[in-house]
């Protein structure tokens, strides 16, 4: 009976489920938004069109969105929640107290009201791009970081944050967030801990025209990150070049012998120049060491020969000194014996005793009377 009446009246009936909504059109024009239940629509010429949408998708996704917003203000107020952001605004949209999405500047978002409840927090990015810490933590937990540039700074480091090419602030260890908001956020991480730098295989021509290769090492740390990054493109490269130049200049003014004899003096002269230059750009240089001086192969052989000759000469001097001391000792002994006949006789007896202990048989020529007489004289 209903169908017959509807046919006579030029209308049709549609059933909208609880979990859906629908936009309906007649003769090509939007007529309204339909809620749940049985709906009666005019359809005399059969041109009624129904566009169904699921509330579970939450977004109002219609081919007729703009027409609905312009022509159906009452239906929009009843069924839809519309958010718009300005040029310097970001909207953090919550559903049932949980962050659902983040709306970028100059954007629009249309949601089904019955899919809510909805709540939005507008952020004015014109007054600052830093995300408030508590809000950042909520965004991290919800995984809604599409509109956030995340900055993570480890212990012992510092972050220099620039916005549109201009330094904005310095950050210590921690996690920070910045709204993208159509601006370029740049981050430069600076290590503040003590670091080492090796300069290896540097060729130096000494004053006496000998080519050496040297290896250097330095320890440094950044004490003024802003000055260090603003003064030079790469401060570690600047230190590398300063070490090269200072040591080449210092060592080039010395002979090979001076370099080999006194490395510490060379280091001190060159290090003072390096420390002064680097302090001017915010870098503190502590230890600088000339680790190795590497000679060419032929020069090493020559030096080995020189060293060997020097050692041989030193050995000859020692031998001559010992011979001189021995001769002087003999001379002193001879003088004592010449002045003391008793001492001379004792020496003769010692010699005789020494000889007798080494032979099996001893023959005394001309008898022993002379020897015994001498013994008697010694006893007297």
Image (tube, rainbow, N blue to C red):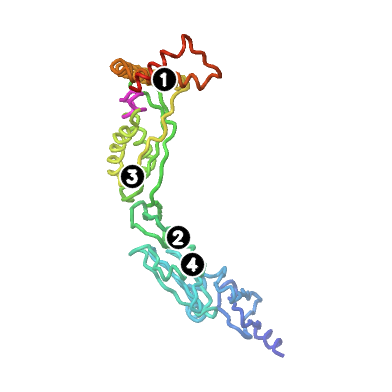
Residue at 30% from the left image edge and 41% from the top image edge: 275
Q: CA distance from mark 4 to mark 2?
A: 10 Å
Q: CA distance from mark 3 to mark 4?
A: 41 Å
Say which mark, if any, is on residue 140. 4
Q: Which residue is mark 3?
A: 286
Q: Magenta-highlighted stretch: main secondary structure?
A: helix
Image-quadrant location for residue 91: bottom left
Q: Earlier in the sequence, mark 3 or mark 1?
A: 3
Quarter of the figure with residue 115 = bottom right
Q: Residues within 10 Å of mark 4 (few under 14, many from 20)?
A: some
Identify the image quadrant of the C terminus: top left
Depth check, mark 3 against mark 1: the one in front is 1
Q: Earlier in the sequence, mark 4 or mark 2?
A: 4
| Image coordinates for residue 166, horizontal then vertical, percent | 33, 52
Tag count: 4
C-alpha separation, residue under disc 3 versus residue under disc 1: 75 Å
Category of crowding for the residue at label 2, using alpha-carbon neighbours closer than 10 angstroms: few (below 14), some (14–19), many (at least 20):
some
Q: Nearer the viewer, residue 104 or 373?
A: 373
In the displayed orientation, state which residue is furthest to the bottom. 1
* Residue at the spot of label 2: 150
Which label was assigned to residue 349?
Answer: 1
Residue 209 visible in rendering: no
Evaluate if marks 3 and 4 touch, with contact meaning CB atoms under 8 Å apart: no
- What secondary structure is marked by label 1? helix
**Residue displayed at 45% across by 72% down:** 83
Where in the figure is residue 193, as x and y percent of width and height? Answer: 39, 52
């Amino acid at each position: 009976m209903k169908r017959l009446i509807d046919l006579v009246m030029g209308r049709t009936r549609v059933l909208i489920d609880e979990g859906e909504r629908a936009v309906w059109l007649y003769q090509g024009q939007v007529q309204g938004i339909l809620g749940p239940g049985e709906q009666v629509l005019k359809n005399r010429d059969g041109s009624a069109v129904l566009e169904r949408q699921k509330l579970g998708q939450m977004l109002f996704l219609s081919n007729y969105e703009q027409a609905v917003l312009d022509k159906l203000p009452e239906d929009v107020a009843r069924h839809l929640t519309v958010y718009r952001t300005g040029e310097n605004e970001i909207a953090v949209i919550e559903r049932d107290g949980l962050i659902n999405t983040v709306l970028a500047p100059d954007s629009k978002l249309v949601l089904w009201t019955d899919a809510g409840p909805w709540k939005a927090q507008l952020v004015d990015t014109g007054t600052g791009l830093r995300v408030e810490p508590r809000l950042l933590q909520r965004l991290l937990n919800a995984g809604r970081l599409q509109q956030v540039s995340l900055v993570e700074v480890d212990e012992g480091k510092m972050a220099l944050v620039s916005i549109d090419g201009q330094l904005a602030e310095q950050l210590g260890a921690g996690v920070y967030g910045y709204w993208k908001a159509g601006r370029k956020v740049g981050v430069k991480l600076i290590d503040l801990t003590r670091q080492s730098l090796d300069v290896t295989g540097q060729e130096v021509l000494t004053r006496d025209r000998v080519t050496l290769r040297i290896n250097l090492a330095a320890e440094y740390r950044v004490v003024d990150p802003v000055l260090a990054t603003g003064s030079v493109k790469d401060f570690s490269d600047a230190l590398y070049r300063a070490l090269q130049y200072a040591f080449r200049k210092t060592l080039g003014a010395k002979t090979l012998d001076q370099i080999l004899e006194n490395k510490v003096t060379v280091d001190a002269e060159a290090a003072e120049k390096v420390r002064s230059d680097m302090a001017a750009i915010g870098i503190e240089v502590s230890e600088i060491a000339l680790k190795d001086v590497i000679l060419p192969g032929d020069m090493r052989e020559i030096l080995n020969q020189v060293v060997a000759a020097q050692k041989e000469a030193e050995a000859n001097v020692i031998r001559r000194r010992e011979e001189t001391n021995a001769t002087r000792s003999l001379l002193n002994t001879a003088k004592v014996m010449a002045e003391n006949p008793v001492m001379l006789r004792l020496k003769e007896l010692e010699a005789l005793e020494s000889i007798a202990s080494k032979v099996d048989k001893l023959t005394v020529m001309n008898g022993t009377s002379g020897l015994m007489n001498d013994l008697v004289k010694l006893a007297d």
